[in-house]
Image (tube, coloured by chain):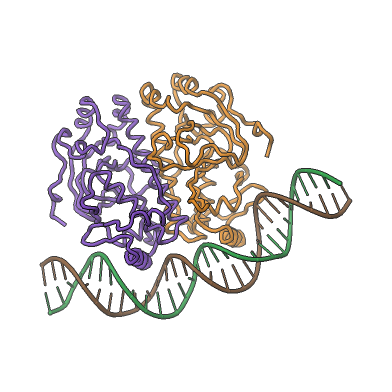
Chain colours: A orange, B purple, C green, D brown
DNA sequence: CGGTAGATTGAGAGTCCTCAAGCTCTGTGG
DNA sequence: CCACAGAGCTTGAGGACTCTCAATCTACCG
């Protein structure tokens, strides 16, 4: 990992130069809306791998859009057991629940070095008022994130270890590929086995044994921080996971 | 269970007579907004216990507000394993994810006879445009529901059977109490052990044994379709569940 | 009085967990 | 150049929690 600033990808000063927005993976916005988003953004921020972007206990905090890097939402029990709720990838909006929550809070931690666009929390209402489109987009993003948590809950509740692993690998590969981050049949994969255990609701040891078994069956390969799906069909069948293609998401 | 119409509580013709809105459990809206909501509503609907309100496969469908009764969102694997994602109680908005989803769909089924207010799906955008407040409220509801799924995921992933049961009983009791549905220290509890197993990610048999054990320890009692928390403190400690008091929710 | 839904119980089998080491790789410092 | 430390990955063994299979029991209904 690089020293701050994190690698070559900090947020550009202007949204017009935004690599995400110009990647084609997101729905276009009008010039007007983009100008508003840019004015709505209060600053940009780089944080190193492993840092806490939002505390599990404290409400408040800011609203972010993840520009580069990986992060995750999580909850912990008081004896330390941790459950990752979902992974956050570039373009994901961070901190929306804190705005509304009943105190059912979660923490957010950076997996890699990350770059963020920062938005003031109390500007959200104005966004809804002045640009209903953007409000609608934000609801879209919230609903999509809920859908991801739904999938994870189905895994944790009803899939066995191998099925959970297969599901996770498929899911992350698809999302990254959709963002244009797949190269030569592989994607960057910065999470370790503890992260995988924590999102799947498994122990570290069992996660290791399951990953190894699937690798030896030729289903995937994780090496040097990259993931290859060696047999996507088999993974899909194992996970019983046949979602429709991803749609372009809004980007705020 | 009654024959249709379900019991004495169908949606009133006018929102002004809405029992939910007048219960004090929801945030007030302006007369203007209420008039819009009433015009936005395309009809009302009663459905019997056990009916499917939304199919797991088909997108589309309508948007509902649950007026009376219980329902749940669920997903199933192709071999029939079912995971309930969360329970829906009066005031909950139903079908929002279908509007946005990437095809990551879920089904919705009525537990009891239910009454619903029906909204046209394609009117949602107009709602955001004309009443940004209401758009904001809908986002609030989406974020709250996600928070509930987050909690369930923490349970399924990291709590053992007894802790999961304790968590669920506390959670449902709190929500019902907040709706003013607690009477003499108990609430209506129309779900069976299969439902409980399906939301907790446990087998029916193990759910039964766990419920029985907690009952014999004097923690709760379920009888004649009602739930009593006999020892809320102990349940709370067991579940490691200490959320802030519930806030009033918006009602659309 | 049979039929059905739901709750209960017992027994045996598995999946998954915890404990405990050992291994590999990388970066640091002498 | 090598010893050392730390993070992450691997492996083995035993035990605990949960699952499946198979019945039985109760309450309610036609």
Residue B162: x %, y % from top left: 40, 61
Residue B55 visible within the image: no
Horizontal side of residue D8 vs A70, given as left or right:
right
Residue B117: x %, y % from top left: 21, 40
Count of labels shown? 0
Horizontal side of residue A106 vs B12, given as left or right:
right
The correct choice, above or below, for A71 with respect to A62 in the image is: below
Residue shown at 28%/61% (left/top)?
B221
The correct choice, above or below, for B62 with respect to A133 in the image is: below
Q: Quadrant of the C terminus of chain B?
A: top left
Residue shown at 40%/57% (left/top)?
B164
Of residues D14 and B48, the one drawn nearer to the viewer in this rendering: D14
Of residues A77 and A36, the one drawn nearer to the viewer in this rendering: A77
Residue B51: x %, y % from top left: 23, 53
Residue shown at 48%/34% (left/top)?
A93
Of residues D29 and B178, the one drawn nearer to the viewer in this rendering: B178
Of residues A127 and A76, the one drawn nearer to the viewer in this rendering: A76
Residue A60 visible within the image: yes
Horizontal side of residue B64 vs A46, given as left or right:
left
The correct choice, above or below, for B182 with respect to A63 in the image is: below
Residue D15: x %, y % from top left: 53, 72
Residue shown at 41%/54% (left/top)?
B237
The correct choice, above or below, for A26 with respect to B80 in the image is: above
Q: Quadrant of the N terminus of chain B?
A: bottom left
């Amino acid at each position: 990992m690089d020293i701050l600033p994190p690698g070559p990808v900090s947020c550009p000063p202007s949204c017009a130069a935004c690599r995400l927005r110009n990647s084609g993976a997101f729905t276009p916005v009008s010039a007007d809306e983009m100008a508003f988003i840019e004015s709505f953004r209060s600053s940009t921020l780089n944080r190193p791998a492993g840092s806490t972007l939002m505390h599990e206990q404290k409400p408040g905090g800011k609203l972010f859009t993840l520009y580069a890097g990986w992060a995750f939402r999580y909850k912990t029990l008081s004896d330390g057991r941790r459950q990752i709720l979902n992974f956050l990838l570039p373009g994901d909006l961070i901190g929306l629940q804190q705005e509304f929550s009943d105190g059912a809070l979660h923490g957010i931690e950076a997996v890699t070095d990350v770059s963020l666009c920062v938005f003031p929390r109390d500007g959200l209402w104005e966004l809804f008022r002045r640009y209903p489109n953007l409000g609608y987009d934000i609801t879209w993003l919230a609903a999509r994130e809920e859908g991801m948590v739904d999938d994870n809950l189905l895994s944790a509740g009803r899939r066995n270890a191998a099925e959970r692993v297969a599901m996770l690998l498929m899911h992350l590969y698809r999302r990254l590929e959709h963002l244009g981050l797949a190269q030569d049949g592989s994607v960057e994969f910065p999470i370790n086995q503890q992260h995988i255990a924590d999102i799947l609701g498994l122990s570290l040891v069992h996660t290791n044994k399951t990953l190894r078994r699937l690798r030896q069956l030729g289903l995937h390969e994780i090496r040097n921080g990259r993931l290859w799906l060696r047999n996507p069909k088999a993974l899909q069948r194992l996970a019983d996971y046949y979602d429709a293609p991803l749609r372009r998401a809004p980007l705020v």
